[in-house]
Image (cartoon, rainbow, N blue to C red):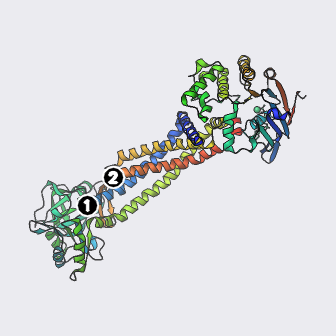
Amino acid sequence: MTESSRSLVSVKNVDKVFKRGSEEIHVLGGLDLDIPEGEFLALMGPSGSGKSTLLNLIGGLDRPSQGSVEVGGERIDQLSNRRLAAWRARHVGLVFQFYNLMPVLTAQKNVELPLLLTHLSRAERKKRAAIALDIVGLSNRNNHYPRTLSGGEQQRVGIARSIVTDPTLLLCDEPTGDLDRKSGDEILDLLQALNREQGKTIVMVTHDIHAAARATRTLYLNKGRLTTEPEE
Amino acid sequence: MAGMFNWISQIVSVTLFNLRTLPQRIGSSTTAIFGIAGVVAVMVGVLSIAQGILRTMENSSSSENVVVLRSGATSEMMSGLSGDDVRFISEGPGLLRQDDEVMASPELFVIINLPIRSTGTDANVPMRGVTRVAGDVHKGFQVVDGRMFEWGLNEVIVGVGALREFAGLEIGSTITVAREEWPVVGIFEASGGIAETEIWVDASVLQPAYRRGNSYQAVYGRLKSPDAFQEFKDALTSDPRLNVKPMREADYHSSQSTVLYNLITGLGTLIAAIMGFGAIFGALNTMYTAVSSRTREIATLRALGFQASPVVISVLSESLLLALLGGAIGASLAWLVFDGFRAATLNFSSFSQVAFAFDVSPALLVRGIVFALIIGLIGGLFPAIRAARQPVSAALREL
Ligand SMILES: Nc1ncnc2c1ncn2[C@@H]1O[C@H](COP(=O)(O)OP(=O)(O)OP(=O)(O)O)[C@@H](O)[C@H]1O
Ligand SMILES: [Mg+2]
């Protein structure tokens, strides 16, 4: 077997161009990346280097200006918007820096949200959301609204929401970026456990070297290149 | 199939979820609601005037009644019938007989000047000279206060609408017409019809006062049944001695009100269109604000895999809900304030005043609410499209 055929994610010769006025910014100058199934990859690099951009391409939140993005054998850059949305719902779990929970929904309902895109019955949705909340250690907070939870707790709800559909791929953009050290560590423990015990493939963007240390591999993005060592 | 179900359940859940966030936008939502309510109230109010006039005309007519004018005349004012004409008309087939009397009432129609009660300015008030059968022919005629005038005397009775709108018509007062004094001796009703704006007097007294000899202007008749009209009409129009135009009473009254009805309806529609235009901008503004305040929520939903169409529909439902509330408030307000409100206006077709009550009919309420929904639909559509078009990744960057 070749290296790429074992990859869950295969990014080839990808570039993303943003227009700022008349100026064109090439963020990822023909970048390649393979992520094997079961890996916990940390992505580091200076601000503005394109980490979020790369993560968005892998998660099907955006399309490359050039190159291909293949996830689980599927060319997601070629899917229609409609099918891409359905693909995200089925295959990707997203964790955001600022949690992005719905303020009018309880923790339980927030976690149930992605399940509305499945054919599960109401009872089944409820059960799965409860299990996910249990996994992140918040089963006693089901009926709490986000504003009554601490940052760390909110992020744990965010993680519960990302795993409730049992996706193959978890994409986390600075998941501990807004948390204190202790809460951040708890989140990292959780991600590590999900990777080790449930075999989730995780890509985590972070600025924190301690967070990156939890990953199985760390890559540095700088000026559109990926390297295994930070450039100086 | 499953995809369809999935799509509908997405719509329902995104919409319900969105509506729960509505209280966060209470301020701008309330503004939009009351803007729309105002438009609907004004529109329904103005149109209820037209509706009220129409209603008055309908109240004036009964289906067995006919009106005969000289052919070519479009109103009683312009018509003239000789004593012979009247006699031949009364012999027409199909007319009802009661106690050996033919239900055909030759009438005289003149216009006098009386001050409007509220403003004191002079207005044209119709005065009708009638014969003994008039009370049986005209729909719902009934003296409700005082007494009927004495036949052969200079006495008048006054319709309740005329009493309400014009000064100096109370029982016991006297009006001056054709340099003669006419005491008011009674008040009458005519089932809410146009006759209630009139003053009635014995035709044989009015004729000499206006030097009309033995001529009249119209014959009002009551047929045995509505079906008898065609026979009656054919007989009169084919009679070589006569040159007249027989009409159903309802057709005559509606022809008398078309100009006024169309004018007011046109005016109401114009006002509604102009105000509605403003309300659309209000709704647009509210909904653009709503959408931009929810940028991150919407982007998150899209990132999680929700389709664009449920987002569009959720924004549209919000604006339609606001419009529905506004429409309902406006329509209720119009109903509370205007329905039954009494007024009088000049009817151009007869050059005389017609008293009426604003009529906020159920159909008008529905029209008001439909109009509100149209405002809501247009006001929500563009913001909804913008919400759906927002690129997910860019929207997620916004805080
Ligand atoms: N939607 C967009 N429109 C215009 N420019 C964009 C857009 N998204 C990203 N960029 C630009 O692309 C570059 C990379 O942005 P990106 O967010 O991927 O960086 P990052 O590595 O995640 O930075 P940070 O560590 O600050 O989050 C930046 O210069 C940014 O301004
Ligand atoms: Mg970033």
Position of residue B395 relative to residue A229, above or below, is below
The Cα–Cα distance between marks 2 and 1, rounded to whole angstroms, is 15 Å
- Read off the chain for label 2: B
Q: Earlier in the sequence, mark 2 or mark 1?
A: 1
Question: On residue B359, which mark appears?
Answer: 2
In the image, B288: left or right of A208?
A: left
Position of residue B119 relative to residue A49, above or below, is below
In the image, B34: left or right of A138?
A: left
Residue A25 vs residue B308, the one in the foreground = B308
Q: Tell me the residue at 49%/42% (across/down).
A: B321
In the image, A217: left or right of B307?
A: right
Total labels: the figure holds: 2
- Mark 2 surroundings within 10 Å by alpha-carbon count, few (fewer than 14), some (14 through 19), many (20 or more): many
How far across and down, in percent of the image, does residue B398 sit? 69, 36
From the image, tell me which residue sits under label 1. B60
| On-image quarter of the C terminus of chain A | top right
The reply to whether residue A19 is in sight is: yes
- Read off the chain for label 1: B
How far across and down, in percent of the image, does residue B276 sit? 49, 51
> Could you tell me the amino acid type at mark 1?
Ser
Q: Tell me the residue at 81%/23% (across/down).
A: A216
How far across and down, in percent of the image, does residue B132 sit? 13, 66
| The quarter of the displayed image where residue B147 is located | bottom left
Q: Residue furthest front?
A: A1
Ligand 1 sits in quadrant: top right
Same-subunit check for callouts 2 and 1? yes
Q: Tell me the residue at 36%/55% (across/down).
A: B49
Q: Residue furthest right?
A: A232
